[in-house]
Each structure stands twice: as structure tokens, then as C-alpha cells.
Image (tube, rainbow, N blue to C red):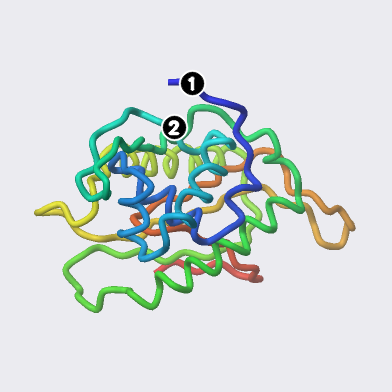
Amino acid sequence: MSLGVVSLKELADPMRLRIVSLVTGAALSTDEIARELDISPALASSHVRALVAAAHLVEVGEETDEAEEPQGVASRYLHVPGLQPARDAGDPEIQTLVYQAMAQELARRGRHCAPTQHLPRLHTDAELWVDPEDWARAVALVREAADLLFRRAHPPRTQGTVHVDATLAMFGMTDETSGAQECEESRLDVVIGRDGAAQPKRTTRGSLR
């Protein structure tokens, strides 16, 4: 399995975020991705090529695709999270574009929020000042939870599974009054779930419910 240099800017598109999540739990061909997301095979192929070039997806094998006419061999792709950091992760303009895409995707997913109460839920939104030790512990705990979900993800609609959203962005901030433009490099950005991504919202207080 050969990996290139990870680039963050290719994730600044809501559809690409959906594709990355989709192939976290199962390796799929571009035709399978197109059918699952109800887009054209050509569009799916274009997005997959960009994500492969940016090292967000890897080709994990080929299988006969019986859905193709004439029948052919289809490459399958998988997202393997956390292999290496993105080379442009510290670029504030690219980071903002990714968060904008995450916000669009979060809005779409929010429209499909299940009304049932049997699943645990968590909504958090905060801009805070905390001790460095507490921040480091919080990031470690959230990373552990994210890793668990990534490792245990299943193919879409696997019997016995539930369809969930988990979207996170945690990072150090500069004070707005300082005029600085960049976030601190110590941060955790996680894009997970069956469909896509999320965005931290600016607020003057924290909320957890």
C-alpha cells in the first residue's frame, strides 16, 4: 500500500468528506460510491482521483464488478485515518475552507438527525481558556474515542449497526485582539461518521448538553 503526502485542501468539499467517511468502514469501487451517494460515476471517479492523489484514500485491490456492462475489474478504495499529518495543516486559509465544507456537510447531516431517544447524544460548542494539562488530556480522550469509531466502522447498513454522526474540530486559538491570523499548531481535527464532517462555531461561552 503506497501513500503520497497528505494534503488537507482536497477535503474542502462536502462531497469529498462524504466519500472519505463512506470508505472508512469498507473498501468500495467508484461505481459503488456513485450508487451509494447518488452521483454520476464520472463525478465519483473525479473526486476519488483527487483524494487518492492527496493520500486520503488508498487503492486496496481489484475485484470483478458484476454491475458493469460489459463486466470488468474495478479498483476499490479505502480511507486509512491517522497515518501521517497533512503537509498544509497549518495553512489558515486552507483550514478555513475545510471548516466551511464541514459546516455545509454538518447542516445536511443535521437534517437527518434521528428523533429517537434510545441512542446517546452529545452536542458541544465551546471557546474557552483552560490549563494546558487539561487541554492535553481532553484531546487525548477525544482522539481515543475517534480512533475507536474509525477502527470499528462497518459498511453502510450492516445489520445490527446504527447510523451515526461524529464530527470534531479541536484546536488552540489566538486572541482576536492580537490581530494574529493563524491557529496554534497543537490541535485535533477529526472528520468521521457515515456521511461527512463538522465545524467548530464561534461563541463567547461553552455549552455541553
Of the pair 74 and 58, the residue shown nearer to us: 74
Q: Name the quarter where the C terminus is drawn.
A: bottom left
**In this view, 183 is above or below 38:** above
Judged left or right of residue 178, residue 30 is: left
Q: Earlier in the sequence, mark 2 or mark 1?
A: 1
Q: Pointers 2 and 1 in contact (CB under 8 A)?
A: yes
Q: Tag on residue 129?
A: none
Residue at the extreme front of the image, as rendered: 70
How far across and how far down the image is residue 190, in percent?
49, 47
Q: Residue at x 35, y 28 (%)?
A: 60
Q: Quadrant of residue 151?
A: top left
For the residue carrying disc 2, how many other residues have a C-alpha within 10 Å: few (<14), some (14-19), or many (20+)? many
The relative height of residue 201 versus residue 147 in the rendered view (above or below) is below
At a point 36% along the width and 62% down the height, the residue shown is 37
Q: Position of residue 20 (x, y in %)?
A: 44, 48
Picture layout, residue 78 above or below residue 3: below
- Quadrant housing the N terminus: top left
Given the current orientation, which residue lies at the most extreme top position?
A: 1
Q: Tell whether 71 sits left or right of 207.
A: left
Pointer 2 residue: 58
Between the residue at mark 2 and the residue at mark 1, the CA separation in whole angstroms equals: 7 Å
Q: Secondary structure at mark 1?
A: loop
Q: Residue 121 in the image: state x and y as whole percent.
A: 31, 65
In terms of secondary structure, where does tag 2 sit? strand
- The picture places residue 21, in percent across and down from the top left corner, at 39, 50
- Name the one closer to the observer, 65 or 47: 65
Q: Tell me the residue at 58%/26% (across/down).
A: 4
Residue at the extreme right: 179
The residue to which callout 1 is attached is: 2
Residue type pointed to by label 2: Val
Q: Amino acid at mark 1?
A: Ser
